Amino acid sequence: MALVAVASAVALLGAGATAASPRRDGDWATWQKDAAGSRHNAAEWRITPHNVKNLKLKWAFAYQKSESPVRSQPAIVDGVAYFGGPDGKFYARDARTGAQRWTTDLSGIAPGPRAAVPWDGPAVADGRVYFGDVRGYLYSLDQRTGRVVWAKQVDAHPAATVTSSPIVHDGKVYVGTSSGENADPDPDHSRAYPCCTFRGHVDALDARTGELVWRHYTVPEPKPVGTWPSGATRYEPSGAGVWSSPTIDPRTGTLYVGTGQNYTGSAGDFDTLLALDVRSGAVKWRNQVTKADTWRGLCNDPSPQGWCPGLADGSALDYDIGATPNLFTVNGRTLVGVGQKVGVYHVFDATTGEVVWRRQLGVPLPSGGISGIQWGTSFDGRRLYIATYFAGPGTLFAVDPGTGAVLWETPHPADGCTTGGAADHPDVCTLAHGPAVSSSPGVVYEGSNDGKLRAYSAHTGRVLWTFDTVRDFATVNGLPGRGGAISGGGGGAVISHGMVYVQAGYWPTYPNPGGSVLLAFGL
């Protein structure tokens, strides 16, 4: 597709700044990269479209073998990489060499029935490192030593989890909470579990103490409304978990975040982009992109009769917003865009919530939402870069932020499952983009279920560099390590100071006798 010029009036809101303080030095201190959620490092000058093909592996770090996938996208600040592992530990390593700075074992902190596995990417601000775990805890660690300053359980529900990477602004930590209750939470799969009682929410916590400042629930309190076929109590409404990471407009004091689908019932802020006041949590506006979406894992069961509340009315979709919003301006107008699992990218007026444009990029696949836009997109000040997951195949797009016009599109390389380590596992490999997209000047990065990380030309969409991670690695910590699918849930590639970092070992699971790996590349 021919390249279309983008108006010079398009500008990145808060380019190169973190939520805590302006950073234009090339660090990547939050999952979002900056308050606007750009996932773009404008200060990166070492890696260019001309030399990106020369990237080489500089070091690899392996985790102890675990049943959990690797998810925690690293933060790179002041020459140190901060990241969590599927082994229940949080690490600080020298960003250039991989040498150890400190390691914090989370297993002894408020022990419970679930392991304390970091489930999101950290935010580093004001001498602290903030991140969440699979048990619904949020942590604040001393940036220099790894000492736990505080650990707060933001939700005591037995299925609560934090996949939303926190963002720090004006002395507060903002984070969303979701849960595994949308899957089968019954340990013996007897369907005797009294589903569903989880309520999604967005929280603001005091960054210094961890005390709750405000909370916005996405659904009303669940109430018993009858029984399931097993006789277990049935509750409604429930769900609308907040899987994604917030973005903030400091100028207007507005936080933007997307929400998930209902598990039961049909009420609340499900499948919604929320604009909240950062000081109080009050709703400035909301835009619900799907009007009926009640789904949980049992909807995909061969015999869902009576177990899938959304099936009868056709609302068993799982078309939630799991992606992080992007803030940008076009001709002086501030806009907020976000991808949806139906495959649509939506753009709204950031002040009013009015729809500006929508573009269908993925192919809708209901009851699982696997064809659309999963975790996040990138904006480099001129173009939006958006990837689709299972979409026959997944595709990377460059889109005009003012109109939604597709400037170029690059389908997933057809040889992804017939080359590299994935070729030995055709039953596992798929041509799908799970990770969030990242970029630096002239280069776009996206990983795949085929275990490959690729760099694309921001100008044309041509593949400039490919690295296969489905292989064994010699590691700086001496453990056996092997890559796999590029991490989706915890983010994507991080570009900082002439280096590129990525986690490898996500779902789908390739055979691995060792542990998953964090990989660091440089010229």
Image (cartoon, rainbow, N blue to C red):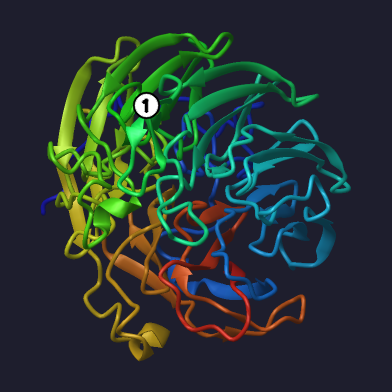
- Percent across and percent down for residue 518 are 61, 67
**Front residue of this view, candidates 442 and 468:** 468
Asked whether 132 or 229 is in front, the reply is 229
Q: What is the three-letter code of the residue carrying label 1?
A: Phe
As displayed, is residue 244 above or below residue 386?
Answer: above
Question: In this rendering, is residue 55 above or below 111?
Answer: below
Residue with the mark numbered 1: 328
- Mark 1, residues whose alpha carbon is within 10 Å: few (<14), some, or many (≥20)? many
The C terminus lies in quadrant = bottom right
Q: Residue at x 49, y 62 (%)?
A: 188
**466 and 503: which one is in front?**
503
Q: Which residue is at 22% across, 28% downward?
A: 402
Q: Is residue 126 visible?
A: yes
Residue name at image x 37 percent, y 69 percent: 449
Q: Is residue 27 above or below residue 215?
A: below
Where does the image place residue 96, in percent across and percent down from the top left? 71, 63
Q: How many marks?
A: 1
Q: Quadrant of the N terminus?
A: bottom left
Residue 409 x/y as whole percent: 19, 55
Q: Please, what secondary structure does the residue beneath circle 1 have?
A: strand
Observer-nearest of 93 and 140: 140
Report which quarter residue 208 is drawn in: top right
- Location of residue 250 with respect to 102 vertically, above or below: above
Residue 262 visible in the current orientation: no
Q: Residue furthest front?
A: 231
Q: Residue 129: x, y in percent?
A: 74, 40
Q: Residue at x 16, y 37 (%)?
A: 359
